[in-house]
Image (tube, coloured by chain):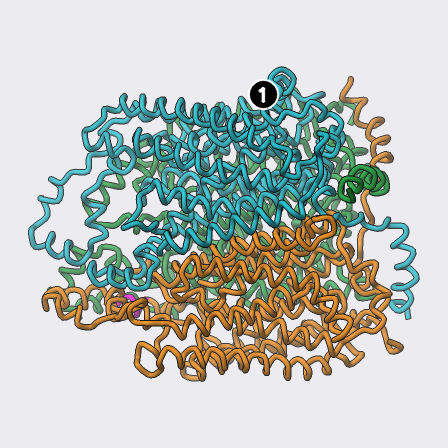
Chain colours: A orange, B cyan, C green
Amino acid sequence: MAGYQTNLRLTLPLTCVILEVILIILFAVLVEYDHETDAKLWHKHLLQHNDSNYNNDFYYRYPSFQDVHVMIFVGFGFLMTFLQRYGFSSVAFNFLIAAFALQWATLMQGFFHGMHGGKIHIGVESMINADFCTGSVLISFGALLGKTSPVQLLLMAVFEVTLFATNEYILLSILQAKDAGGSMTIHTFGAYFGLVVARVLYRPQLDKSKHKNCSVYHSDLFAMIGTIYLWMFWPSFNSAITAHGDDQHRTVMNTYYSLAACTLATFAMSSLVGPGGKLDMVHIQNAALAGGVAVGTAGEMMLTPFGSMAVGFLAGTISTLGYKFLSPVMEKKLKIQDTCGVHNLHGMPGILGAVVGAVTASLATREVYGDGSVLALRRLSPRRVYVSVCVQHVSLTSRLSSSMEDVFPEIYAGNFSASEQGVRQAISLAVTLGMALVGGVIVGFILKLPIYSGPPDTICFEDAIYWEVPGEMESQEELGTVMSEEVQKPLNS
Amino acid sequence: MAGYQTNLRLTLPLTCVILEVILIILFAVLVEYDHETDAKLWHKHLLQHNDSNYNNDFYYRYPSFQDVHVMIFVGFGFLMTFLQRYGFSSVAFNFLIAAFALQWATLMQGFFHGMHGGKIHIGVESMINADFCTGSVLISFGALLGKTSPVQLLLMAVFEVTLFATNEYILLSILQAKDAGGSMTIHTFGAYFGLVVARVLYRPQLDKSKHKNCSVYHSDLFAMIGTIYLWMFWPSFNSAITAHGDDQHRTVMNTYYSLAACTLATFAMSSLVGPGGKLDMVHIQNAALAGGVAVGTAGEMMLTPFGSMAVGFLAGTISTLGYKFLSPVMEKKLKIQDTCGVHNLHGMPGILGAVVGAVTASLATREVYGDGSVLALRRLSPRRVYVSVCVQHVSLTSRLSSSMEDVFPEIYAGNFSASEQGVRQAISLAVTLGMALVGGVIVGFILKLPIYSGPPDTICFEDAIYWEVPGEMESQEELGTVMSEEVQKPLNS
Amino acid sequence: MAGYQTNLRLTLPLTCVILEVILIILFAVLVEYDHETDAKLWHKHLLQHNDSNYNNDFYYRYPSFQDVHVMIFVGFGFLMTFLQRYGFSSVAFNFLIAAFALQWATLMQGFFHGMHGGKIHIGVESMINADFCTGSVLISFGALLGKTSPVQLLLMAVFEVTLFATNEYILLSILQAKDAGGSMTIHTFGAYFGLVVARVLYRPQLDKSKHKNCSVYHSDLFAMIGTIYLWMFWPSFNSAITAHGDDQHRTVMNTYYSLAACTLATFAMSSLVGPGGKLDMVHIQNAALAGGVAVGTAGEMMLTPFGSMAVGFLAGTISTLGYKFLSPVMEKKLKIQDTCGVHNLHGMPGILGAVVGAVTASLATREVYGDGSVLALRRLSPRRVYVSVCVQHVSLTSRLSSSMEDVFPEIYAGNFSASEQGVRQAISLAVTLGMALVGGVIVGFILKLPIYSGPPDTICFEDAIYWEVPGEMESQEELGTVMSEEVQKPLNS
């Protein structure tokens, strides 16, 4: 680390300004409001379909979006404040790279999701997708926490968002896999990408900063703010872009029960493996969330409540044991310094989620998902059909679909069998792992260049290198004395 | 406390695993998605009723559910972090017992709310009800905070959820009482149940832990996170399961104004009784919420905005005075060690809420609530009725009801007079108190057995007995020196 | 400050009780549920319009309201906890004056927004408007933070709410200006009003409390809770009362992109002007929010995504530079002691927002906003129109409007040209500044009277003057020793 210098004043403003200017130019050239956001197009739609403002998708997606937004900025941000002297960087670099990534993701996902006359159309759904992609970058950030400069993180976001969008396109559009809550696209990808980058950026002398790589009492409480918000809103995360109606409703319930079971497993395992049966905050803060990750793919499917609970219980168990036994081995043997243990929270539970998704998909039947029958429509009187068609296009849409079409459109259309869907899910997991590993190596080496104001091994996990850090509170005795003189007098008078 | 030992490594994993396995088995046997969550049933519903996915109740309950969820996990969890050395336990045991209780409540409430062909049907409404029941357990937890092990708390939840569901069934189904926000079922029941358990578990030597039974500066700020979230989302709590339309809208407004008035009363009383007019954080953290409790029954009724404000003002006054004058007496004379003062926040305001509900119900008239007239329908042309019936079943439902039917179905149906409804409300309060007292005594003695890894009197209110607690932050001077050597050098270069 | 005494026990209870009693009486005389909240009126509406409970505006405004509510109580409250010894006062006085202001604002805005038969009608929209007005008071509070008693703040709220409602009436009803997110009515007004009051209340000897007018490590983290919530929910703030459909959807997106760009600008500028390129938490906590302020007027217009980003980038830049260079000058030369720097977060970005709004309005065309054509209706068959009219009044409303009518009703109606709308927007800014300056001077002198229990210059920024402040946590060594004796023994046994 001879060439080390924190030339942040040069690199950070330059990086931020260049990236934002590029974003603004690309948005000017390429981005338009979609038909539900644009003044003219929406009112044209209202007229043509005799629709109501109340049916703007905004009302059916925005509450979920805000829950996801809270997870990204408060959830991830505060979860990482557990380090005693890295709270400013945790919450604020999380803030910075998320603010960048969501803009860049809008563009990259827009390219892949299909242009409209050369333009990317944006609305509440693109906002949710951008936040999802951002989540993946923040997972990778978790593996690197304390050891990277904001410039490195922004640069990583540039590449990771691009790779994320590519992988997502391959999975969802080419392989026709299902992954509404992102067990594969978000969690597995983000975790293994970050782990590989951490491996490439291996710091042999990191133990010189070891005394700062731990929590203090209050920093653990701040981290619990992040944990609890992630836990509460995970049902919204997994359901945010599933089909309307039973799909969103069911995804929410599956995630809710998976997380509840996961929490009991986490407490059980943490106490079982702790010294003297004592619980470890690291497990509670992280492993209790694994249940959300593990139903990210299958959550929208007919997983059943008890199935969700079983998956959650398994995820909490694996994750806690991973923190206790696997992480130390990975650091020693594989030289992967995974600050937040993202392998245990996102990596293994993500793979579990992908497998559960593949199995659940391969078991899909028309008996369970229903068969949206056009015949049913015929049983209506022609008169009623006419009224319905001309008056209520919304319910018409739903009438012509089945839940099978919503969850597994290709099985519904007869293009795949259920077992083929399962195979494609499994292939998707393999593709995701491959993209993460190859991408991580390349990006890792780019980030290794000594030009990004990274910290030396001796002062990792330390805010003071990037921040003007205030002092601690004056000691109570000191204040107490001052107070007793200043305050008490007038009060007693 | 001779037989004391914290054999948590044995008892906690065993309790968690056994309970969760039982839950998973019972869910497998007994629980099904309801018709709005199940893939096949919802699409069948769509077809039969020509309905729209946008009318899935998910969209009209889930935002309220998430607000309630935040209250349960962030609100209750952080409110209890005020103790200086019990923050981990407060927020994490709250997390653990809530995650268990919501699963168990799904089953117990499912039994009582009616099985469907031997199955319990679950959806967003059952999720809200389960969170409500959980809230009651957490109120009892508040009375026991710092003096019980997580094993005791889980066991208490097993029994309390069962009793809650029984009491709720008696009140809502047998007595036909109204209690949408749970002044009786949640607050009165939870508070008095917890107080009786605390009485049975009385610790004569608790003053040996007295120095830890208080807050520090930052722990009080963490507690304010809980307070503010409870305060903000209480309107969602009280309205979460009221009828759609004016009922939810009105309940929200009544709660909002009651809380606002309650806050001013709390500040006034706190300053009035404080030494030198100084405010006390305990009052602000707790008594400012009593306004939400006190309109838990009457909130959905035509209480009027100024009526809500008067009730809230009274609740804040009673609650603050209770903290100042009643709690010390209860501890000394009645031997009830009520850590969080739940008697002041949930007990007395809950009874007040029950009384206000009884009075408001007994004053209900058809002039005020309207008279959902089927005659009105007849005034429509037959043609229009036909179109309406076949096209818009949703509005049809609403057209045939009145708000009287929504709020007081038995008065609407002519089965009760308004004053009989009021009497039934009053009986419900008595039943609730009886259930809480008897149940609390029994459960208290069960929890008194010395096998649950409870803390000795000398180390109550202390995380270190159950947690691996990290050290405090290194002193600033120490870090400052290191920093000035390590960091300043490269920056100046 | 010779006549100084903190006679809070007298003044605070008296002020709170008198204000609340007046509020309750005025509510009893003047306030009624509106037709969507009242039991009878809503069911009458359902019958007459064949409407559905699901169309109650509650479902389309309440999620936004709750986001705004979080901003007011958590966002503003915690943002101000950055001071090391003023956390209790920051979050709790914010709580107190907001609880009062929202009740008072309901009345004052009710007067101006139009009485219904001598009554003020309230519902979810009046709740949002009251929270908005409250926000303005809290902005002024930011300028005075640490230097005023709760009695002074309540009194300020009485006057400021009245002036706010007057100014809002002049702008929105008389001048027909547009200002959905309140760049002018909320931010510019609140900031300059507060700054003028701060000027009148100038404390020449405030440097005696200088050592407390700064943050400590954990207080900065608490403040970030406020920042992040404000940042996340600002899209809900700006869109909370815009027209349904594309308007709300578009406002959300514009605000979201403006904030994202603003965040990158803030990090860039903070590092650029910081010593050694180090970031300053004050900038991140505050300036990153300026993008929300700056699109408060134009957010609902067709600002385009890249336009929003450009405005946000500019706002973040101006705001950060203001904190660094302008605030010290204002304190030294203009004698304005602006504790939170509201001039940089709300003042300048508010003016920027007003200007952007005026320019965007003056560029409005029917090509961009669409022309809600009644002709289009004629192209429908009479039959279909009849069915539509009698069955679906909601969509009818939307069909007869255009987005031009929603955003610029006067331009739509042909009463104004676009450039005249722009001129009226500019006049509105001038009126707002005038009202704030004149009002601030008068209210400042009222608050200068030495009868409100204000703190002396020597103990500003200090909770202990108004609060019973607990001690700090016992030192770790001390606790550690106790623990090792008490806890370890049984665990090892």
Q: Crowding at label 1, few (<14), some or many (≥20) Cα neighbours within 10 Å?
A: many
Magenta residues (range)? A43-47
Q: Name the side, left or right, on which A366 lies relative to A337.
A: left
Q: Is residue A220 magenta?
A: no
Please state the total of marks drawn on the protein image: 1
Residue B79 location, quadrant: top right
Residue highlighted by disc 1: B321
Q: Residue at x 71, y 29 (%)?
A: B1
- Residue A281 position, x and y percent, is 68, 52
Does residue A279 appear left or right of residue A355 in this picture?
right
Where residue B50 sits in the image (x, y, percent)?
A: 21, 61
- Which of the image's four quarters has the N terminus of chain C? top right
The correct choice, above or below, for A116 with respect to B134 in the image is below
Q: Quadrant of residue A24?
A: bottom right
Q: Residue at x 84, y 66 (%)?
A: A207
Picture coordinates of residue C377, whole percent (x, y): 20, 66
Majority secondary structure in the magenta region: helix
Q: Residue at x 66, y 56 (%)?
A: A283
SS of the residue under disc 1: helix
Reply above or below: A139 against B381: below
Q: Is residue A45 magenta?
A: yes
Residue A351 drawn above or below residue C235? below
Host chain of mark 1: B
Q: Please tell me which residue lies in front, C483 or A44.
A: C483
Tell me where residue B364 appears, x and y as whole percent: 28, 26
The residue that appears at 32% across and 48% down in the rendered structure is: C56
Asked if one can make out residue B257 in the rendered structure from this viewpoint, the answer is: yes
Q: Amino acid at mark 1?
A: Leu
- Image quadrant holding the C terminus of chain C, namely top right
